[in-house]
Amino acid sequence: MQALASLLLAVAWMEPLPPPLAVLRNPDFDTDPVTAAAPTNWRWYLDSGTGGELVWDATVGSPSAGSGRVRNFRSGAREDFWAQCVRLAPGAFTLRAAVSPQLKANASCELRIEVLNQPDCNTSAGVLLTASVGNVTNNAGFETLEVARTAPLHSGAAWVSLIHRQTGAAQPGYSYCHFDHVEWDSQLLFSGSFE
């Protein structure tokens, strides 16, 4: 299974990024991002230390079923995540996501945004701003994570990442983050409710 996930990962990151939109594609994980038809929506990254898994969970979600699950079994520092590129103009923005953490010690769920100085998320883009927020609860159902900032002058795009992170002190054992209902509010467009 890990070999198949690694192969799918390699194929996903080799295909060209679709042009970023002002809205997130599949923000409620209503469909499986791994088998979704082009344009690809959520990209996935597995830490090179192995042990990670990113899958679509058709049974868990908020407010309805369907979420992106990130987990890792191994010990030590690891970072596995879903990510998507969106257009972003200079000015105020708010990013929210629902997350249901089921974590081992020294692990966390994180919502992160990296604001870039180009209108897409290519490898030559410079990072102008990084902001993130982590879970507060554990094993208590879904909570809302929110990042509200101001994108600086020359902002053109941003990476939105939904992360399972663990520190070097993490021991073996499964640890999960179910992400769902990602909301994006920027100067370009407001995508507030997806029900």
Image (spheres, rainbow, N blue to C red):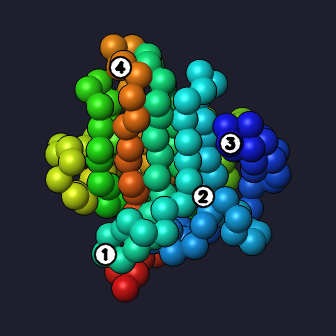
Disc 2 and disc 4: Cα gap in Å?
A: 27 Å
Mark 3 and mark 1 lie on one chain; the one further toward the N terminus is 3
| Kind of residue at disc 3 | Met
Closest to the observer: 42 or 69? 69
From mark 4 to mark 3, how far is it between C-alphas? 23 Å
Q: In the picture shown, does residue 159 fall above or below 181?
A: above
Cα distance between the residues tagged 3 and 2: 20 Å
Mark 4 vs mark 3: which is more N-terminal?
A: 3
Instruction: Compute the Cα span from label 2 to label 1.
Output: 19 Å
- Quick one: label 3 or label 2, which is nearer the N terminus? 3
Amino acid type for the residue under numbered disc 2: Trp
Give the structural element (helix, strand or loop) at label 2.
loop
Under circle 3, the secondary element is: loop
The residue singled out by tag 4 in the image is 170
Amino acid type shown at disc 4: Ala
| Residue type indicated by callout 1 | Pro
Q: Secondary structure at mark 4?
A: loop
Would residue 183 be visible to someone looking at this image?
A: no
